[in-house]
Image (cartoon, rainbow, N blue to C red):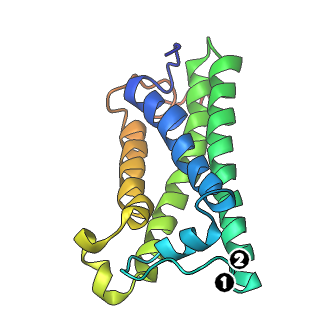
């Protein structure tokens, strides 16, 4: 892995590689295989078989494809913005950290709302029964908790050197 002071070690692995793959993959699964009908069915764990293609109305089908596009966008932003910060600012870890931190702030807010809506959307009998969740539910709740935990650890400076966040401001209220 290349030198990336603002996103070292495990953080780099998680947010420069694993997270983009985990957000781009659902888009591919919706658009190509196994498809929007499968994805829609898997959102709520149950034992019923996947309905045949074409069972969803046009609005639901459109919403699932748009959801795939949102996943794709998140993966692309992480992939391109983080790499751009690394490559354009190799000798400026404070600037790298400001860009990563701004992105992590937005992503952390999205993590929290995504988990809340995913959990609220579950039937009451499944909300408190993670053993009955399927891989989709664990991806939408459990894996997002891991991602959020990593972001919070990054903000706390755990396992990394801080260059901007947690450093004293220089000048009149302007951090550099």
- Residue 56, numbered circle: 1
Residue at left offset 63%, top offset 36%: 79
Between 40 and 109, the residue placed more toward the observer is 40
Left or right placement of residue 69 versus residue 163 in this view: right
The residue at which mark 2 appears reads as 61
Residue at left offset 76%, top offset 83%: 58
Is 136 placed above or below 11 here?
below
Q: Are marks 2 and 1 in contact (CB under 8 Å)?
A: yes
Secondary structure beneath disc 1? Answer: loop
Residue at left offset 62%, top offset 64%: 35
Is 89 placed above or below 20 here?
above
Where residue 172 appears, x then y in whole percent? 63, 33
Q: Residues within 10 Å of mark 1 (few under 14, many from 20)?
A: some
Q: Quadrant of residue 176?
A: top right
Alpha-carbon distance for marks 2 and 1? 6 Å
- Residue 94, numbered circle: none
Q: Residues within 10 Å of mark 2 (few under 14, many from 20)?
A: some
Is 130 placed above or below 56 here?
above
């Amino acid at each position: 892995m290349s030198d990336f002071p603002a996103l070292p070690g495990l953080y780099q692995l998680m947010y420069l590689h694993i997270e983009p793959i985990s957000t781009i993959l659902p888009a591919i699964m919706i658009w190509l295989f196994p498809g929007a009908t499968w994805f829609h069915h898997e959102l709520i764990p149950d034992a019923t078989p996947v309905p045949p293609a074409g069972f969803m109305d046009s609005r639901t089908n459109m919403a699932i494809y748009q959801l795939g596009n949102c996943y794709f966008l998140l993966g692309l932003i992480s992939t391109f913005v983080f790499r751009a910060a690394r490559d354009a600012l190799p000798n400026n870890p404070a600037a790298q950290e400001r860009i990563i931190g701004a992105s992590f702030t937005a992503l952390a807010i999205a993590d929290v709302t995504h988990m809340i809506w995913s959990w609220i959307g579950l039937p009451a009998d499944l909300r408190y029964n993670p053993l009955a969740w399927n891989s989709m539910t664990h991806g939408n709740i459990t894996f997002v908790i891991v991602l959020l935990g990593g972001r919070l650890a990054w903000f706390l400076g755990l396992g990394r050197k801080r260059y901007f966040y947690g450093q004293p401001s220089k000048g009149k209220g302007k951090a550099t």
